[in-house]
Image: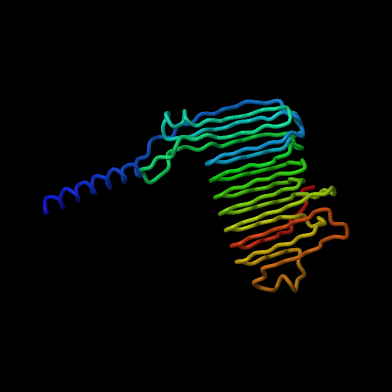
Amino acid sequence: MAKRTVITFALRLLIAVALASSVAYPAEEVDEIVEKNYPLDPTARFTLQNDDGSVLIYGADIAEMKLRATKRAYSQERLNKIDINVAVRPDEISVKTGYPPKPKWGLFDRSGTVDYVIVLPWRCQVQQVELGNGDIVIEGMRGNEVHARVNNGRLFGRNCFTDLHASIGNGEVDVAYEWWETHQIGLETNVAAGSTFISIPRDAQFRLLATTANGNIFSDFSSLEDQKQRGRSKVNLLVGDVPNADMQIHAVDGSIKIKESYNHD
């Protein structure tokens, strides 16, 4: 019995040392950059799926998609198994990221990441951008709609004068408008757990409904009396005589801050 106990302890010790060594001394990271341009109708539909990494999307006055993808992994073998799959039609383009199976053993993930930088026609219809873990940044889009979701991470929207839908499982949503435009736009954010920050110019005209089940709401656009109140879980605002934006800001577990920004003229 004593011999068996010693052998069992030795095996456990060897496993612990192996795991500790793999954490303390990970293999050196390797990477590969993929760059390509694709002709695209200015109002085409766009979708993207990625498990881990980042997605940066910029709108521009062009008739093509410019793609730059940086693949990273902790071995050349795993790097070679990360696939960037682009399917192109005249009115639609989709980008899907394929990863090798994640290892069953070890205390950290060696399956790899992909960081995308994509420039699209600014009137492109962004039907869905999905990211498992990481950050999404979307800037300068002006099409009919933009839909984006991150399971764990952060989602930033910058000067997207469109119908923007942003959702987070766990993390942060940050949407900002540096100036205001007068055509009809929309914003809907949904956060399951995390923080929401909305920045709107002082000359904007909009309708806004903000709710949180567990958290507080702070708004620079509320009356001074309302701003002094603590623990508000719902804010309903009508700002301006001719509002051209409808904003729905919702959180299950987290606070919401609606800040007044200054025009960058």
The chosen color scheme is: rainbow
Image quarter in which the N terminus is found: bottom left
In the drawing, does residue 105 fall left or right of residue 8?
Answer: right
In the figure, 194 relative to 229: above or below?
above
Image point 11% across, 54% down: which residue?
2
Image point 19% across, 49% down: which residue?
8
Image point 40% across, 40% down: which residue?
103
Give percent across and percent down for residue 93.
Answer: 67, 32
Give percent across and percent down for residue 223.
Answer: 77, 69
Which residue is farthest left?
2
In the drawing, does residue 111 fall left or right of residue 205?
Answer: left
Q: Nearer the viewer, residue 247 or 135?
A: 247
Give percent across and percent down for residue 220.
Answer: 73, 63
In the drawing, does residue 24 fall left or right of residue 245?
Answer: left
In the figure, 14 relative to 189: above or below?
above
Give percent across and percent down for residue 231.
Answer: 64, 72
Q: Nearer the viewer, residue 88 or 30?
A: 88
Instruction: Count every numbered label the image shows and give the total.
Output: 0
Image point 68% across, 30% down: which residue?
65
